[in-house]
Image: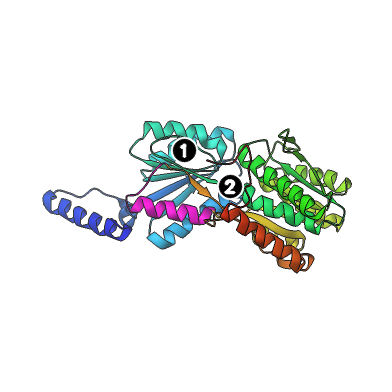
């Protein structure tokens, strides 16, 4: 049944119920009398709704689903770890058919509430949680990060690039693995020796802030990389990465690679001039697709995995820094993208989603 048919059927059933009720008084729904029959509730992690990262992208997806399907949407914002489980419980209590949670921190609460409420459907971004009524939304960001690493090596003037993460969780280290491999591939193709600071893929060890919100900490971390001659920096640390943009802008040297969404569009306008590209996760379209399937009665628990092939991951345009990217380098990146999609080139990580 299509979502349009779903709504027509709902109206027919509702009308029949009213006829059977005769003159019985109708329940007072107050301000909710015009509420949509289907709604979705989102619970953020502690990064908040406007984190310029996956919370913001997920919320954009819900708003797009509202526009396309006419559903009700709302978000419950977590401000610290103690909010997480109560907020998921609160979302369940709204009576909405779909609960969307964002980030690995919400994995346990999502699993527990899904088990306790098998009639509801859950989706979680950036984490695989098993359950008959849980849809994981994950992204093979290493594929796009590989392109970004190749790009970084190709534009670096110092032969040194850097990265740092919020903490060593798979959704974070997946970016870093792909980035390091992209740099290594550039070195192999060009006989270069560009170094990556901040991450050792073989040892799975590197530079982490332990935080996703402290912008000052991000600035200090990026300054340490700049002091070691890194001229392209990839922060994988949510809002903390904004500090890296500030450090690069203040120094007047270097470039930033953002993650999750296009930093040129989502970061403060002052930072646009330092953004080289962004490693994108198309969370918005994934959320819309999953809600559409749920409305059509086709919800399942098979993970949605965003790839270069299905458009779930990509790198953003170079915007103001397009002049730094020679046509030959652009052509090489385009060929690498095609090779990854065709399977001629495989990008692997210990954190690759399956």
* Image quarter (top left, top right, bottom left or bottom right) of the N terminus: bottom left
Q: Residue at x 76, y 47 (%)?
A: 184
Q: Is residue 289 magenta?
A: yes
Relative placement, left or right, of 210 versus 17 is right
Q: Residue 73: percent from the left, percent from the top?
A: 43, 52
Left or right: residue 67 versus residue 341 is left
Q: Dot 2 corresponds to which residue?
A: 140
Say whether marks 1 and 2 touch (CB < 8 Å).
Answer: no
Residue 318 in the image, given as x and y percentages of width and height:
71, 64
Q: Nearer the viewer, residue 330 or 73?
A: 330
Is 316 on the left-hand or right-hand side of 154?
A: left
Within 10 Å of disc 1 (Cα), the crowding (few <14, some 14-19, many 20+) is: many
Residue range of the region highlighted in magenta in the rendering: 283-301
Disc 2 crowd, CA 10 A, few/some/many (<14, 14-19, 20+): many
Write down the residue under mark 1. 88
Identify the residue at horizontal 25%, vertical 59% (top origin): 8
């Amino acid at each position: 049944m299509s979502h349009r048919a779903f709504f027509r059927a709902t109206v027919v059933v509702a009308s029949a119920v009213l006829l059977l009720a005769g003159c019985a008084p109708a329940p007072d729904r107050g301000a909710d009398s015009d509420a949509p029959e289907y709604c979705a509730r989102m619970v953020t992690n502690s990064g908040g709704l406007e984190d310029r990262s996956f919370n913001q992208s997920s919320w954009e997806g819900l708003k797009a689903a509202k526009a396309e399907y006419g559903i009700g949407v709302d978000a419950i914002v977590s401000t610290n770890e103690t909010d997480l489980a109560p907020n998921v419980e609160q979302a369940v209590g709204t009576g909405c058919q779909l609960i969307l949670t964002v980030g690995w921190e919400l994995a346990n609460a999502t699993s527990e509430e899904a088990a306790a409420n098998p009639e509801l459907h859950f989706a979680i971004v950036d984490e695989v949680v098993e359950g008959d009524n849980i849809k994981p939304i994950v992204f093979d960001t290493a594929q796009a990060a590989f392109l970004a690493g190749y790009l970084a090596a190709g534009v670096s003037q110092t032969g040194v690039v850097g990265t740092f993460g919020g903490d060593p969780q798979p959704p974070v280290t997946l970016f870093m693995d792909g980035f390091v491999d992209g740099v290594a591939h550039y070195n192999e193709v060009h006989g270069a020796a560009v170094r990556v600071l901040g991450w050792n893929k073989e040892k799975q060890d590197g530079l982490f802030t332990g935080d996703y919100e402290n912008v000052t900490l991000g600035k200090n971390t990026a300054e340490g990389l700049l002091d070691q001659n890194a001229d392209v920096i990839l922060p994988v640390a949510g809002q903390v990465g904004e500090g890296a943009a500030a450090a690069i802008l203040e120094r007047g040297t270097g470039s930033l690679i953002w993650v999750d969404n296009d930093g040129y569009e989502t970061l403060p306008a002052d930072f646009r001039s330092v953004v080289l590209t962004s490693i994108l996760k198309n969370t918005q379209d994934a959320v819309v697709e999953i809600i559409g399937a749920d409305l059509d009665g086709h919800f399942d628990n098979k993970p949605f995995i965003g790839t270069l092939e299905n458009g779930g991951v990509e790198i953003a345009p170079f915007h103001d820094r397009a002049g730094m990217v020679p046509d030959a380098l652009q052509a090489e990146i385009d060929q690498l993208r095609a090779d990854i999609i065709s399977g001629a080139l495989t990008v692997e990580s210990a954190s690759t989603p399956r």
